[in-house]
Image: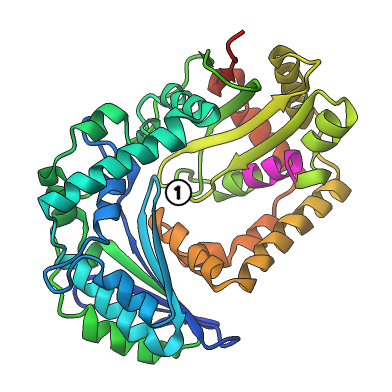
């Protein structure tokens, strides 16, 4: 059964696999991606990093195709491929000629249920993953500070664990851990296949039935609610480590689209962070970088499509003649301004235009379109939420921005992280 919206079609196979196809006929290519509802936020103490480790092993061969065969087949057919593990999902994709979509499906369906986890290959890749953690986190002052910052910012939220895993857990991961994780989460009824490109939806559906249809459903656990406990006061962490420059990160515990009964609040928060950080025209850049020159760099972020409540984050590097304390006060002053004074209609209109333009630019890339579809699906939402993004942003009012600023950007909801280089 297909449900369509413009050029996007949704199907469901009998084994539970969801297929979403977006026809885009601008070039004779296709992006084929398989999204599994499992990532760092699904893990528990003792096995953090197992999702990412399994992602690496998914390229090490199946019972049908030996190590390296999958990579060679895609390469020999002029394609590219990669994968990523995030907090809420693990995703594998190929970009190739549209007439090679069947090859992608054949290979992905095979490793969905027939992965061959071999001890000798695991031992080698185990070392690779631990070295990746050392390079990405342990030897990167800001990444290390961010990791500890998240661990402090959350109490009962799985985002307190790094997706790459704590090193102590990584060292003790076993092949048995990976087998259990694979058998638990890698099944058609826990996957969404997203296809964007020069294809016809009905033909893609038939290919999906051919390759994924025979796979048996698995017994996928239902996640228990992980609602973050109410904040009872601000939190702070200071990292005294070797670094070239100091760094400030501030995060407020806020709801996301899935976690709020009032959807407008999530969109108002998205507009709020855009007002503060809309590139060169955002308030933080205009006032604190170019204006008062308190910071040399400043950024803001808010992930509206998270599986659990998340953080609205502002991070910055202070100018050489200003302290972290001065920078923090200046940022809090900008937030206070949002709380006390509604944004003007003119500024709101300009910010909305930038947000919407950025969203439209996503359509220029098939890969970005695939992300646009897959990410909300992994947050137990729908690709239709992404399709409705522009209209919902347009509906945000100055009063709504002020309301969420006052409701959520409170001191009790704040966590502050400071990277203080050794003297």
Judge whether residue 18 is colored magenta: no
User: Residue 297: which quarter of the image?
Assistant: top right
Q: Relative to 182, is 420 above or below?
A: above
- Quadrant where the image shows the N terminus: bottom left
Q: Position of residue 247 (x, y in %)?
A: 63, 23
- Is 275 on the left-hand or right-hand side of 80? right
- Is 117 on the left-hand or right-hand side of 256? left
- Quadrant where the image shows the C terminus: top right
On the question of residue 197 being in view, the answer is no
Question: Which residues, given as a range, are shown in magenta?
Answer: 269-278
Q: Nearer the viewer, residue 97 or 357?
A: 97
Q: Position of residue 402 (x, y in %)?
A: 72, 36
Judge whether residue 270 is colored magenta: yes
Identify the main secondary structure in magenta.
Answer: helix
Q: Secondary structure at mark 1?
A: loop
- How many residues crowd mark 1 within 10 Å: few (<14), some (14–19), many (20+)? some
Q: Position of residue 238 (x, y in %)?
A: 53, 14
Disc 1 marks which residue? 258
On the question of residue 259 being in view, the answer is yes
How many numbered marks have been drawn onto this rendered protein structure?
1
- Is 228 on the left-hand or right-hand side of 27? left
Residue lying at 26% horizontally and 67% vertically, measured from the top left: 68
User: Residue 192: which quarter of the image?
Assistant: bottom left
Residue lying at 32% horizontally and 85% vertically, measured from the top left: 102
Residue lying at 32% horizontally and 70% vertically, measured from the top left: 71
User: Residue 67: which quarter of the image?
Assistant: bottom left
């Amino acid at each position: 059964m297909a449900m369509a919206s413009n050029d996007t079609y949704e199907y469901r196979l009998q084994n539970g696999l969801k297929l979403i196809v977006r026809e885009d006929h601008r070039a004779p290519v296709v992006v084929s991606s398989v999204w599994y509802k499992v990532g760092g936020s699904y893990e528990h103490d003792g096995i953090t990093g197992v999702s990412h480790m399994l992602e690496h092993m998914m390229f090490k061969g199946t019972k049908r195709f030996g190590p390296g065969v999958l990579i060679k087949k895609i390469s020999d057919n002029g394609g590219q491929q990669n994968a990523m593990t995030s907090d809420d999902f693990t995703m594998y994709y190929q970009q190739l000629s549209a007439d090679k979509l069947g090859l992608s499906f054949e290979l992905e369906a095979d490793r969905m249920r027939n992965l061959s986890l071999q001890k000798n290959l695991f031992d080698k890749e185990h070392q690779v993953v631990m070295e990746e953690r050392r390079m990405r986190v342990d030897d990167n002052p800001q990444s290390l500070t961010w990791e500890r910052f998240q661990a402090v910012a959350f109490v009962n939220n799985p985002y307190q664990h790094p997706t790459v895993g704590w090193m102590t857990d990584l060292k003790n991961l076993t092949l048995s851990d990976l087998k259990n994780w694979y058998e638990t989460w890698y099944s058609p009824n826990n996957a969404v296949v997203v296809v964007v490109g020069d294809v016809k939806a009905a033909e893609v559906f038939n290919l999906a039935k051919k390759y994924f249809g025979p796979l048996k459903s698995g017994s996928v656990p239902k996640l228990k609610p992980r609602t973050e406990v109410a904040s009872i006061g601000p939190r702070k962490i200071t990292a005294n480590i070797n670094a070239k420059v100091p760094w400030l990160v501030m995060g407020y515990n806020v709801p996301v689209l899935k976690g709020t009964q009032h959807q407008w609040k999530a969109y108002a928060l998205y507009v709020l962070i855009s007002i503060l950080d809309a590139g060169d025209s955002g308030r933080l850049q205009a006032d604190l970088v170019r204006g008062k020159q308190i910071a040399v760099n400043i950024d803001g972020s808010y992930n509206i499509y998270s599986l659990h409540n998340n953080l609205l984050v502002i991070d910055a590097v202070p100018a050489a003649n200003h302290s972290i304390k001065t920078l923090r006060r200046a940022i809090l002053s900008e937030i206070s301004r949002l709380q006390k004074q509604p944004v003007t209609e003119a500024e709101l209109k300009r910010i909305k235009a930038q947000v919407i333009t950025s969203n439209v630019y996503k359509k220029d890339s098939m890969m970005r379109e695939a992300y646009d579809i897959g990410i909300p699906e992994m947050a137990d939402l729908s690709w239709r939420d992404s399709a409705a993004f522009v209209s919902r942003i347009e509906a945000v009012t100055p009063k709504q921005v002020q309301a969420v600023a006052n409701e959520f950007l409170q001191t009790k909801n704040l966590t502050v992280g400071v990277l203080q280089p050794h003297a």
